[in-house]
Amino acid sequence: MNLRSNHTLTDADLIQGSIEGNRDIQELLYHRFSSKMYAVCLRYSGNAADAQDLLQEGFIKVFKNLNKFRGEGSFEGWMRRIFLNTSIEHYRKKVNMLSVTETQEVTIEDREWNILDDLAEKDIISMIHELSPGYRVVFNMHVIEGYSHKEIADILGINEGTSKSQLARAKGVLKKMVENRLNINRTVKEI
Amino acid sequence: MQTLKDKMYNYEVTPPSESWQIIASELDENKTGNSLLFKKRSEVFYLSLSAAAAISIFVFGLIFWESNNKGTDDKITAPKTTSNNESGIGKASMLSEDGNKESGSKYITITSPQGECVKISSKAARLILSSDDQNPPKPVVWSAKVNKWKDIMESNVFAPATANFLDVVELTHTLKMDN
């Protein structure tokens, strides 16, 4: 039976089979969610190699803790939290949060973010990789995952003001990166 | 921002093909690793237990042997010819187990013909030896003296106790009368 092409199995079937230790079912579960989870890992890591490590570590945690999934909420959401926690654990030491006051924040209007919409995901990921670990984590958690600053502060063990300032700085760095990229493109077009 | 969020949230990237192989092997290692670890732990536990038991047996054996040896070092065997001893005073041979005539310790233990063990000062060892006719040679004068004391003691019906002052006085009186 070619399990990779078998999409009739529900998430519940995959979970049950994986808990029972069926390696084929585990592989099927991996292939169903690995692309999305790898994208999560890529966003939180600084490079592809680290992302691969996170992916492997995250999936091993998923398989070990499958019996703890109560079926409350989506399975994908549960997996995402595991990968998010794994990423945060992995980068907690690297994250150097600088506490700054609200007045030091760099304010960027939301409308300025429209420029990111025009970029391909791959380009955005490559720019996120260039952010420092602290900026990257806060940016991902707030902008992509939708956590509030209070939630981020609780999870990362920082204060809310620090979370806000980290995000503002991350936005500032990203804005510069986008501008540089657009300028380069314009120059290339003129040539 | 909503567009960026949706775009990035649902973004998918195919991971490297070897990732699953690594995860599968890791899961296999965890599965077998735990049992192997348990097995290893059991082996180590039983080996430690055996070693501890062996050491304990050795140590206790050594202590037992030592104490046995120490006990026999000072022990003086009862003479085999005590049956013809009329006086009832035990003549102990000073032979210890290792064949030494005298023990170097402060006290020696002698066994009386009745089988009672008596602990006495080692200074008295020579005296006892001298009174033993079976352990020559010894000076004739010394032997004669000891024999004389023996005769006195055998003929004397009075056995004074050193703790009683009146007995000591009586002993002096008896000796004077004998002289």
Image (tube, coloured by chain):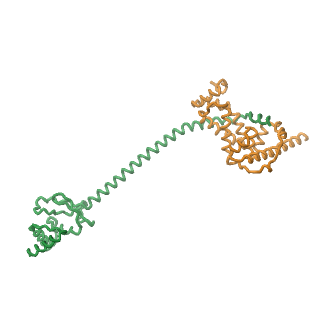
Residue under the image location 57 percent in, 38 percent down: B30
A97 to the left or right of B88? right
Image coordinates of residue B138 in percent, x first then y, are: 16, 70
Residue under the image location 79 percent in, 45 percent down: A168
Look at chain A in the picture and name its colour: orange
Q: Quadrant of residue A4?
A: top right
B48 to the left or right of A102? left
A177 to the left or right of A32? right
- The residue positioned farthest toward the right in the image shown: A190
Look at chain B in the picture and name its colour: green
Image coordinates of residue B115 in percent, x first then y, are: 18, 57
Image quarter in which the N terminus of chain B is found: top right
Image quarter in which the C terminus of chain B is found: bottom left
The answer to whether residue A53 is seen in the rendering is: no
Image coordinates of residue B116 in percent, x first then y, are: 19, 58
Q: Quadrant of residue B85?
A: bottom left
Image coordinates of residue A112 in percent, x first then y, are: 84, 41
Q: Quadrant of residue A35?
A: top right
